[in-house]
């Protein structure tokens, strides 16, 4: 059982908090974390839609999944989603680049106009796709979401150091597990396979991630 004590708030209140970080002319990074099925990608996408492209862009941590070919070579394919199945150093490096990103001077403008490109993860093929999200220097707020933003090992603390605030999403445990099972089914698993994955590998990851919640700037449950 990993239900966490959380502050209840509406989505509109969440948007208002995020909007407070979207200061034109400055760069802020907001991280959303939580266990698998907590709603991170859904909430992040809804925040982006509510704020609009002039204020915010999304950079998911999932773009740094190691490719299946690499995971098989490492013997880790059967626990894809664990913290050591990501390129944590690459993610930390990108967060630092995004934090320090500036509009180039007129004399320095090249083909990219100061744009930083981030990878994304396609669940349809279960693989990352590199350089597919353009981050423009004038975008004030970058929202990133992923499981391990608060982990205190490897390169993860370097990523956290580049992020201004991290919010931990903590829905009811029964809600989270149901979402996760339905998500696995939606991407082709049978009900039995979905339950096995959600209550096995995913649950072990969820418990490890819940242990990091105390390091979040806020623990939140949407109502």
Image (cartoon, grey):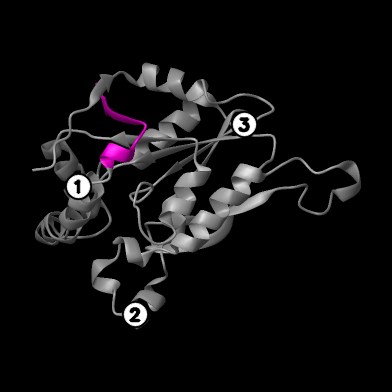
Taking the magenta stretch, the answer to whether it contains residue 222 is yes
Badge 1 element: helix
On the picture, is 2 further left or further right than 111? left
Residue of label 3: 140
Any part of residue 39 in sight: no
The image's mark for residue 74 is 2
Bounds of the magenta span?
A: 213-223
Residue of label 1: 182
Q: CA distance from mark 1 to mark 2?
A: 29 Å
Q: Is residue 53 above or below residue 197?
A: above
Q: CA distance from mark 1 to mark 3?
A: 34 Å
Badge 3 element: loop
Residue ID at (29%, 73%) = 77
Residue ID at (19%, 47%) = 182
Residue 151, percent from left and from top: 34, 52
- Image quarter where the N terminus lies is top left
Residue 218, percent from left and from top: 33, 29
């Amino acid at each position: 059982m990993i239900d966490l004590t959380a502050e209840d708030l509406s989505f509109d209140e969440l948007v208002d908090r995020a909007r407070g970080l979207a200061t034109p002319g400055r760069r802020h990074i907001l991280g959303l974390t939580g266990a698998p099925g907590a709603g991170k990608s859904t909430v992040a996408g809804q925040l982006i839609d509510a704020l609009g492209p002039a204020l915010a862009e999304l950079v998911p941590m999932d773009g740094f999944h190691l490719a299946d070919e690499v995971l098989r070579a490492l013997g880790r394919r059967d626990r894809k989603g664990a913290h050591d199945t990501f390129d944590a150093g690459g993610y930390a490096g990108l967060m630092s680049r995004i934090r320090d990103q500036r509009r180039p001077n007129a004399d320095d403008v090249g083909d990219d106009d100061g744009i930083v490109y981030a990878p994304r993860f396609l669940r349809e093929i279960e693989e990352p796709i590199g350089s597919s999200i353009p981050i423009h220097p004038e975008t004030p707020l970058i929202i990133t979401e992923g499981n391990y933003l608060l982990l205190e090992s490897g390169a993860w603390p370097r990523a956290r150091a580049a992020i201004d605030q991290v919010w931990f999403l903590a829905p009811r445990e029964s809600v989270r597990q149901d979402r996760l099972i339905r998500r696995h089914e939606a991407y082709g698993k049978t009900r039995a396979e979905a339950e096995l994955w959600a209550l096995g590998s995913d649950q072990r990851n969820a418990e490890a991630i819940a242990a990091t919640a105390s390091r979040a700037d806020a623990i939140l449950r949407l109502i």
